[in-house]
Image (tube, rainbow, N blue to C red):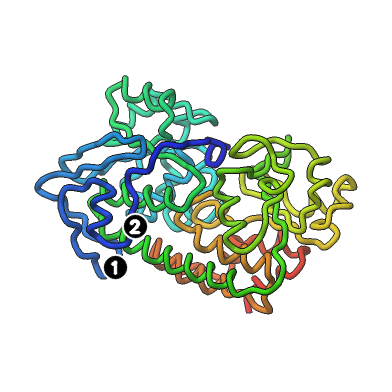
Amino acid sequence: MRVDDLNRRTALQALLAGGSAAFLAGCGASAPPPAASPSGSGSSSASTQGISITDQRGKTLTFAKPVTRVVTIPMPAASLLVAVDGGAEHLSGMHNASWVAMRDGILGTMFPRALDLPHEIATQDFTPNVESVRALNPDVVVQWSDAQLIEPLENAGLTVLGLTNTGKQEDVDAWVAMFAAMLGKPGRATEIKARSDQELAEVKALAAGRGSPAPSILYFNRFTGGLKAAAANTYNDFYIKLVGGTNPATGEDPLPGTGMVGLDVEQVLRWDPEVILLGNFDAAMPQDIYSDPVWQNISAVRSRRVYKVPLGGYRWDPPGQESPLMWHWLSDVAFPQARSGVRNKATDYFRFLYNHVPTADELDKILWTAANNESADYRQFNAG
């Protein structure tokens, strides 16, 4: 799937540095950001000078006022827009894979309007259906920066905001900054980045303080219908190493190329990973591996350390607004605790991102507690 498959090297133009002034320098917004509202959503008032944003391909877009109709094609973009905006009122259409994540996760429960939105606007490889997009009359279309994906939209007279994904946290920061700016809520970007930076520092400190050896962790973006694993320049490789693990796909016997790379079972047997992560881009579950004789000689299977990655407001495996929760979850998977703090962190983070307090059942659904029940040490994530 192109969320991590695309190998984009465009220089970032919209990085947040932590303060409001740095945010404006990165996004090209033309007026100072207003103070954040008590609800944490920032101000929705537009600058009298309009809004100017430089996207990740280096193109400057201008808006006379905050946008109110946004179509998103990159898969993380729809839920990210909802989190930044505090609702789905300004989302007009999205990629089908974004819609599926909303349906299968809990974002559709939190914002049911989103499930009624058009979502057949692009192919699986993000090629846009230009007429379908035009029919939605968007103020802006969010698209990956590849020229062949953007040009058909611009040739049709549409305004396009280009995103890149280089497998780094800075990309997420840039996306948040641009979305907040075009929505007229720059203060919201400062809030989100501050929270993310705080969690990043905490996870780094935990990793630095460990004396135990790093487990080898292999992430499968695809399992059924052909294996694909996270190789170089992927966000998955970033967070595996962030929590103190090692990624065999980028180790001494690495996969060739970048992004999500196809491989066979023989390669996995040679690596013999200690932990296997199953992503949310297909229906594979730990039991599928545990019950397959082909996988029985792999360490992760013998020790029952195969895990389905959580699915919250969006999938936790690719980059997004809930990535700090992924960092903490993976840290506890790799280095088990008597009792994980992820449920409490998720409750607090969902309140911050969506003004929603998840129920115990919703947290079980997010964390796949039933599907992961037979995996080692997963009871640490159960309700107390």
Q: Are marks 1 and 2 in contact (CB under 8 Å)?
A: yes
The image shows residue 16 at horizontal and vertical percentages of 33, 55
Residue that protrudes farthest toward the front in the picture: 252
Residue ID at (43%, 26%) = 149
Residue that protrudes farthest toward the left in the picture: 48
For disc 2, the marked residue is 86
Residue ID at (43%, 23%) = 148
Residue ID at (72%, 57%) = 216
Q: Nearer the viewer, residue 141 or 119?
A: 141
Local SS, label 2: loop
Residue type, numbered disc 2:
Gly
For disc 1, the marked residue is 39
Residue 268 in the figure: left or right of residue 27: right
Q: Which mark is residue 203?
A: none
The part of the image, by quadrant, that contains residue 330 is bottom right
Local crowd size for mark 2, using a 10 Å CA cut-off: few (<14), some (14–19), many (≥20): many
The image shows residue 255 at horizontal and vertical percentages of 69, 39
Residue 35 in the figure: left or right of residue 365: left
Q: Nearer the viewer, residue 360 or 282?
A: 282
- Measured Cα–Cα span from mark 1 to mark 2: 9 Å
The image shows residue 276 at horizontal and vertical percentages of 73, 54
The image shows residue 200 at horizontal and vertical percentages of 48, 65
- Precedes in sequence: disc 1 or disc 2: 1
Residue 72 in the figure: left or right of residue 54: right
The part of the image, by quadrant, that contains residue 130 is top left
Residue type, numbered disc 1:
Ser
Residue ID at (15%, 40%) = 64
Look at the picture and state if 213 lies above or below 179.
below
